Amino acid sequence: MDVRSRDYADLARTIIEDTPGVRKAVSGATAAFDAARRRAYAEIDAEAWRRWAEGVKNHVLTHLDQYLEEAEARLQENGAKVHWAGNAQEARHIVAELAQARGVRSVVKGKSMLTEEIELNPALEERGIHVYETDLGEYILQLLDEAPSHILGPAIHRSLEDVQALFADRLGTAADALPDDLAAAARTELRARFQEADMGVSGGNFLVAETGTLALIENEGNIRLTTSLPRIHVALVGIEKLLPTFGDLAGFLQLTARAGTGQAIGCFVSLIQGPATAPGDDGPEEVHIVLVDNGRTDVLADEHAWETLRCVRCGACLNTCPVYKQTGGHAYGWVYSGPIGAVLDPGLLGLEQTAPLPFASSLCGACFDACPVRIPIPDLLLHWRRAAQARGLTPLSERAGLKAFTAMATRPALYRYLGRVGPRLAGSSLFRRLPVLSGWTEHREPPEPSPRRFRDLWSEGIGE
Ligand code: SF4
């Protein structure tokens, strides 16, 4: 995907004006997720859990080299092959070479944001290897040739009517098919793909260093089939996904499910130790774990941004964000959207590519309250805003406005004069048409200026 976030304002405007159904679908779905998360948090001492999870992830991230080596050793003892990918190109190359060397013609894939990040599907398709998405949301998007718009619910921007029309056209279901019938049609179609696939590709929610266990959470069962039915399983895992111990995993499985979907735990949790060990055993003949950096060590080296690497991709910050709810994820221009995208994308892609994203927030702080690993997203938004300002990446109009304010605020006579005429200007139609301000006043009444200036009240001794 080469849409980059510089276009944020244009993309957001286009989505809101041209596709009002997106706003309705996204608002409805995220409100339901958010309500479920609040209920699930209320059942536990959420603050204590969140502080514990924050501490575990901080410990891993500050000892990452040690835990990566431990995980590699355990995975190899378990019979898995470990690959290291420094960037997206290397990760794509590793998977494509594995597939070609083994004569793979068909791949089934579980939902994985990392494979979206490295653009794996086109790389495999270029080599004549067919990739079939098996998560229902991803399957819908593959039929539509669209990118995911939410970390957890990739197709939440699509309404039931959209899916009914799509499946009627592509799978021959009734135009008014019920959701269960639509899911059954997709299941039937995908069963054939599972049976013929030579390779299953997944992501990984967590990788336990102590035991070399790859953990995957899902609600549909497609990941379990993806990782167990084909003869080869390849998992692409970001290097930040490590947990020290199996005991830590127990806590993270519960907390991640509560944050993302409000469940006590996901419907299916797959714990993968390695390939089948004896002929006739269930499971793939080969398991490959590709540990992907792709900018993560640079983020880790940033004294502020490193905290974004605690993210467990639960989507809770998206579900509670008043800005994300208006547009869905496509306005953000890359795979990671919403509040986490606004602070992670600048670190992974570079601020030059993504400078508008940290400004796509009201700084209300709801994302921090929802986050199971207490990532200080509002602070990080400010961090990236300051960096964008310092590098001259903010809009010209904003920089000119701040310069004008500085000129006024550092000249007492000018400040006093504008303090006298300002309130009269604020009520005029000219004020409403000023650049930048007009974007705000077009839809709102500007507040009535006070009839008495603070300066006058102060000089009269009122308020002392
Ligand atoms: S930043 Fe926190 S709330 Fe948002 S997806 Fe990551 S872990 Fe979940």
Image (spheres, rainbow, N blue to C red):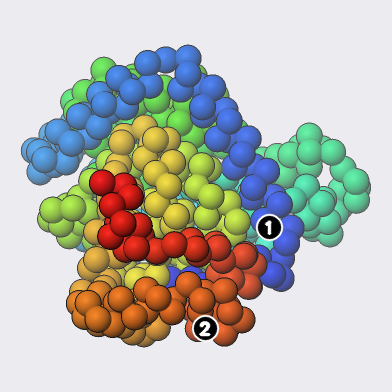
Q: Determine whether, in the image, residue 111 is placed left or right of residue 243.
A: right
- What residue is pinned by disc 2? 434
Q: Amino acid at mark 1?
A: Val
Tell which tag, 1 or 2, sits nearer the viewer.
2
Badge 2 marks a residue whose secondary structure is: loop
Work out whether 433 lies above or below 251: below
When the figure is inspected, residue 78 is found, relative to residue 305, above or below; the finding is above
Q: Nearer the viewer, residue 88 or 123?
A: 88
In the rendered image, residue 259, in percent from the top left (x then y), is placed at 45, 31
Q: Which mark is residue 22?
A: 1
Density class for disc 2 (Cα within 10 Å; few <14, some 14-19, many ≥20) is few
Relative placement, left or right, of 85 versus 271 is left
Q: CA distance from mark 1 to mark 2?
A: 31 Å
Taking 298 as reference, is 117 left or right?
right
Which amino acid type corresponds to the residue marked 2 in the rendered image?
Answer: Leu
Asked if the residues shown at circle 1 and circle 2 are in contact, with their CB atoms under 8 angstroms apart, the answer is no
Is the shortest distance between ligand 1 and the CB of mark 2 under 8 Å? no
Q: Quadrant of residue 207?
A: top left
Residue at 31% in and 34% down: 373
Point out the tag, 1 or 2, that comes first from the N-terminus: 1
- Say if disc 1 is inside 8 Å of ligand 1: no
